Amino acid sequence: MRNVVIVVMIAVLAGCEYHNVSYEIPTIENYLPLKVGNYWNFESISFSQGQSSNQIHREVASTATINNHEYYLLITTSTNDYYTYKDSSYYRIDHNGYVYIYRKSSPNYEDNRFRLNGNDHDTWSYPVEAGDQAQVTLTVESVTLGNVTLTNCKSHYYNVIQWADEENTITLAPGIGFVKEYSNAWGLGQELKSAMIDGQVFNF
């Protein structure tokens, strides 16, 4: 009986340490938890504005049916000392774990930016405007936020060969979703500071 208790304790402690509280890393199928009310708060630094801090809030606001597909509406609000900017995008996940992003400003296209079940070094492409192709490369890696290290994160590097200065990387962590976004072209980025996923609050 004692050996069973020890095994259980080891299994619990093998999870991710989150501000001195151990929890088990959620399942791989949960790289992008979309549920109305879930949100992510980021902070970014814009060197062009003298180190001013941007506060970014992204929230799953509602669901919608578009072209016979069920989507989640994600609204991203970016605020600093100079302006407030809002972006609305519609996300859906198919049975393969492919994430499609639809924007009303580009009604003829869906971005296949993420593949939640993808493996390290997977690559794929999809059409964008003017007949060009976006190329995505997936890398599995660890991400450190504050004093927390999240393992098995999936970073998606985006590039359109015919375009300039659009290269960027978005990283998803299991059970949390968006944790880091980085412009490879401009050298700027944003990291997750807090999130609420399925009623659980995370602070980094």
Image (spheres, helix red, strand yellow):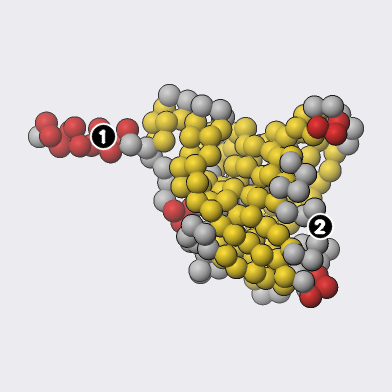
Element on which disc 2 rests: loop
56 up-or-down from 109: above or below: above
**Could you tell me which residue is drawn at 86 percent across and 31 percent down?**
49
- Mark 1, residue position: 10
Question: Is residue 198 something one can see in this rendering?
Answer: no
Residue 50 coordinates in the image, percent (x, y):
84, 27
Amino acid beneath label 1: Ile
- Mark 2, residue position: 164
> Is residue 12 left or right of 49 when viewed as pictured?
left
Amino acid beneath label 2: Ala
Q: Looking at this view, is 145 or 7 the one in front?
A: 145
Q: Residue furthest left?
A: 1
Residue 166 coordinates in the image, percent (x, y):
77, 55
Q: Looking at this view, is 99 or 164 the one in front?
A: 164
- Kindly indicate the quadrant of the structure image that contains residue 126: bottom right
**Could you tell me which residue is drawn at 62 percent across and 42 percent down?**
180
